[in-house]
Amino acid sequence: MNIGIDLDGVIFNTEEMFRACAELYDFSLGLSGPSCPKEMKINRRYSWSKEDFRDFYTKNLFTILEKAPLVPLAKEVVDALKKEGHEIFFVTSRSLPREKEITYQRLKEENLNYPVHFSTGDKFSTCKDLQIDVMIDDYYEYIDALSKAGIRCIQITPPPLKEVHRKNVTICRNWGEVYRAIQNFSQNKK
């Protein structure tokens, strides 16, 4: 199978770091926490001013991308899937030149030598071009759009973030569950 894999929140634990940094930033503003706790994206999760959002991202974006650890067992499972004959493609919405530079640097450091496709908000076209059988992502809007287009998806998401409940979407909490889901897909495909 051709497997597409998002980076942020799926391979790198950037989303958890963003949420933690946002909590600290929100506290520093004297505010009381997220106004929409089920939202993943910081600009929808908090009721900050545009200036506060800009300040938060300016102070945190690149540091988080550089320092976020791998999600537990992500590398081990991805490498195992490759050894089993699956084709692996990283599909990310990172788009800034510095984000791309950090991406290549981090993947090299972690010995994750798989093709990277920078899909600035249009993962469907990339998945279609790559003939992706299964897309692993954490962001419900991408999962929703891809699954509506008929692409089987695995959504890795911690509660209480939004989940997509659709016939061709499997919700997983960790890479052990992802591995099991891929094995089930492979057996059912035969």
Image: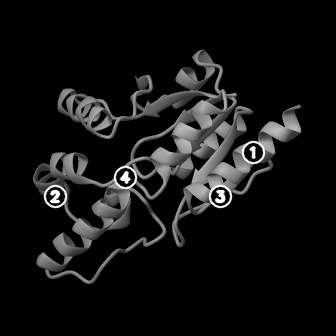
Q: Quick check: can you spot residue 168?
A: no
Name the element at disc 3: helix
Q: Which residue is found at the position 58% from the left and 43% from the top? A: 136
Task: Look at the numbered discs 3 and 2 and tell me whether their residues touch, using CB distance below 8 Å.
Answer: no
Q: Which residue is found at the position 16% from the left and 55% from the top? A: 60
Q: Which residue is mark 3?
A: 177
Disc nearer the start of the sequence (4/2): 2
Name the element at disc 4: loop
Residue 1 screen position, x and y as percent: 70, 28
Q: Give the left or right position of residue 72, taking residue 87 as reference.
A: left
C-alpha distance separating marks 1 and 4? 22 Å
Q: Which residue is mark 1?
A: 183
Kind of residue at badge 2: Phe
Q: Which residue is mark 4?
A: 70
Disc nearer the start of the sequence (1/2): 2
Disc nearer the start of the sequence (3/2): 2
Quarter-of-image position of residue 53: bottom left
Q: What label does residue 25 carry, if any?
A: none
Residue 155 screen position, x and y as percent: 60, 52
C-alpha distance separating marks 1 and 2? 40 Å
Task: Look at the numbered discs 1 and 4 and tell me whether their residues touch, using CB distance below 8 Å.
Answer: no
Disc nearer the start of the sequence (4/3): 4
Quarter-of-image position of residue 16: bottom left
Q: Which residue is found at the position 80% from the left and 47% from the top? A: 184
Q: Which residue is mark 2?
A: 56
Kind of residue at badge 4: Leu
Above or below — where is 92 with respect to 45?
above
Residue 178 screen position, x and y as percent: 63, 52
